[in-house]
Image (cartoon, grey):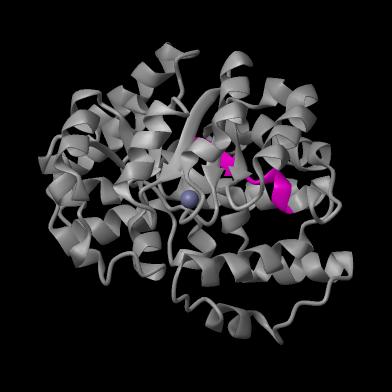
Amino acid sequence: MPVPKAELHLHIEGTLEPELAFALAARNGVTLPYVDTAALREAYRFSDLQSFLDLYYGLMAVLRTAEDFTELADAYLERAAAQGVRHAEIFFDPQAHTARGVPIGTVIEGLGASLDRAEERYGISTRLILCFLRDESAESALATLEAAKPYLHRITGVGLDSAEVGHPPAKFREVYEEAARLGLRRVAHAGEEGPAAYVREALDVLGVERIDHGLRCMEDPSLVERLARERVPLTLCPLSNVRLRVIDTLADHPLRAMMTAGLMVTVNSDDPAYFGGYVGDNFDGVRDALGLEPEQLRELARNSFEASFLEDDEARRERYLAEVEAYEFGGA
Ligand SMILES: [Zn+2]
């Protein structure tokens, strides 16, 4: 069994495997522009973030009903459980669905039906994080948060994702202020393709508690020092970084240097159906490419629970952390 871990950077839409995409397309009468799953997988050769996003949003057309979202989340949880995930904080992009005429309530209730039984079925506790698309307007983000208000009992926090360059965090100051007033936790993607300055802005203007990706902080030593001092968690996604050409190979990943610099980093899968692996595969990938020792893998697992939004259930966090400490890494 893999080391117990929390997954903190996972877009549920990014868990749509080609087989499920074709099954949902058939059920919903949607025609996909690929002859079969092999042709679709062939399209997963991305040159950058935008080329991925184009395919990603196109494929979402198959998600129509609450049941579709329930099946999508069930499929993720089953795979995640097999890779040692004990707690998952799951992102979803309501605007990508409401823009296609799928009501936000359908999305949230569909996902919620799966998450309600995740612990019993898969042994995974869950939280849901509503993400705004940063290439949409600030007004659209505000309208999305407004539309989500009847469902806030299901939502732990807000995030910010999609095309980063040219869409600085400050654009979303107002909606993050409103989210804070509503008692929601705050995270944001920053410093993936965008500059280190976006990481600072996400902290200072949006008040985020975690940075998603954030690897370009390494270009700014004073920012690294601050992130380390304030113990700001960074949710890294190594396989995603290679697939989206942020780095050339896993061996080039700054994860080890980030740990040495005292940063609180975690390992996650981002959009696993598209990037060649789930969270356990990301752990194995960095272990092999960077030669991580068992105690460094334990630190990554420990960080994942310490960085998770379990303040409402500290007893659970302690249980998970005890599992991490008791875990015995094998020889391989
Ligand atoms: Zn992401």
Rendered view: 94 above or below 36: above
Would residue 126 be found to the left or right of residue 318 on screen? Answer: right
Of 91 and 123, which appears nearest the observer?
91
Task: Classify residue 290 by image quadrant.
Answer: bottom left
- The answer to whether residue 113 is visible is no
Residue 89, magenta (yes or no): yes
Residue at 61%, 85% (x, y): give it: 39
In the image shown, does 133 or 61 lie closer to the viewer? 133
Q: Residue placed at 50% from the left, 28% from the top? A: 186
Q: In the rendered image of this protein, does residue 242 appear above or below residue 183?
A: below
Residue 29 x %, y %: 89, 70
| Residue at the image position 67 percent from the left and 63 percent from the top | 57
Residue at 35% across / 49% down in the picture?
Answer: 191
- Tell me where residue 129 sits by quadrant: top right
Residue range corresponding to the magenta coloring: 88-96
Q: Nearer the viewer, residue 251 or 87?
A: 251
Return the x and y of residue 239 as percentages of the image width and height.
36, 62
Residue 332 rendering spot, x and y as whole percentages? 18, 58
Image location of residue 31, percent across then percent down: 82, 77
**Residue 141 visible in the displayed image:** yes
The answer to whether 321 is drawn above or below residue 243 in the figure is above
Judged left or right of residue 135, residue 192 is left
